[in-house]
Image (cartoon, coloured by chain):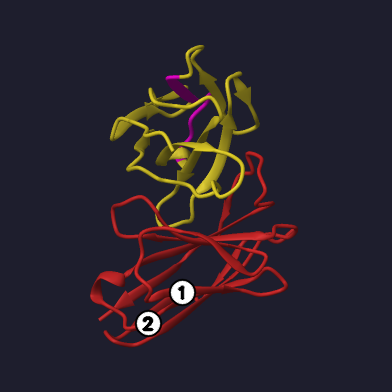
């Protein structure tokens, strides 16, 4: 049973560029959440996708956007990269959006460095 | 979601029980207590969750006080591989409440 996978593992970009990060959820999961973790801090919620729609969003600018595909995989896009976007980006999957104390399973993350 | 308070760091001797406390005095009746841990440079790992009864699984035990204002995560026999940041999170369920709000957690250092 495959867990949550993310690609790429590491990425280096230049200020002003755009980046796309990818996530495949755990088998059987239909909900994907994205988190940003700056060095030394806890993960911060970016947004969550269910049924190919953004269902809720954290306090992140519109430069951060996402997409969910019919197979439940997801992409995180960041435009006009800033130095402050350097962080570990985590994808988490879970089952069901309609309720229940469903735990989230995290992938290993993508380390993004903006120079 | 209710706010949680955890000590920034704790030490534990290898083989001994590690008891990690968490205060959540503003917890609501429909909010669960979740514990995750994050080993350096890895994604957070789900450990356990509970509503009001004590819970146990293969990784840990969760003790929630009767008034639900605090809880303790117990690792019965800590090993060096348990060194990690442990996050206590309180979260409601239902509808658009599936996000996790992480604090700064407790850095548990298991000493040989």
Check disc 2 and report the residue beneath it: A79
Which residue shows up at 36% across the image and 50% down it?
A42
Tell me: residue B112, above or below residue B97.
above
Please report contact status of discs 1 and 2: CB closer than 8 Å, yes or no.
yes
Chain letter, colour yellow: B
Check disc 1 and report the residue beneath it: A65
Residue nearest the observer in this picture, B52 or B88: B52
Q: Tell me residue A88's x, y (percent).
A: 39, 64
> SS for tag 2?
loop
**Does B76 lie within the magenta span?**
yes
Q: Which mark is residue A22?
A: none
Q: Tell me residue A57's x, y (percent).
A: 46, 60
Chain letter, colour red: A
Residue span colored magenta: B69-80
Residue extending farthest to the top is B66
Q: Is residue B8 left or right of residue B38?
A: left
Q: Is residue B69 visible?
A: yes
Tell me: residue A80, above or below residue A41.
below
């Amino acid at each position: 049973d495959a867990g949550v996978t993310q690609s790429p593992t590491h990425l280096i970009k230049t200020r002003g560029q755009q980046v796309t990060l990818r996530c495949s959820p755990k088998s059987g999961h239909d909900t994907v959440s994205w988190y940003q973790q700056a060095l030394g801090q806890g993960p911060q919620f970016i947004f969550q996708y269910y049924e190919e729609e953004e269902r809720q969003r954290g306090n992140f600018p519109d430069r951060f956007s996402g997409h969910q595909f019919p197979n439940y995989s997801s992409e995180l896009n960041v435009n006009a990269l800033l130095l402050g976007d350097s962080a570990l980006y985590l994808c988490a999957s879970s089952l069901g959006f309609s309720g229940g104390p469903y735990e989230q399973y995290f992938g290993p993350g993508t380390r993004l460095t903006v120079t | 979601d209710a706010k949680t308070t955890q000590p920034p760091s704790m030490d534990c001797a290898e083989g001994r029980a590690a008891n990690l406390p968490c205060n959540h005095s503003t917890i609501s009746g429909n909010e669960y207590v979740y514990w995750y841990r994050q080993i350096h440079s890895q994604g957070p790992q789900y450990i356990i969750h509970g509503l009001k009864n004590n819970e146990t699984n293969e990784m840990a035990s969760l003790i929630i006080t009767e008034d639900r204002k605090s809880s303790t995560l117990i690792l019965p026999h800590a090993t060096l591989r348990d060194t990690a940041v442990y996050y206590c999170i309180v979260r409601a369920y239902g509808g658009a409440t599936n996000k996790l709000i992480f604090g700064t957690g407790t850095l548990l250092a298991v000493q040989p």
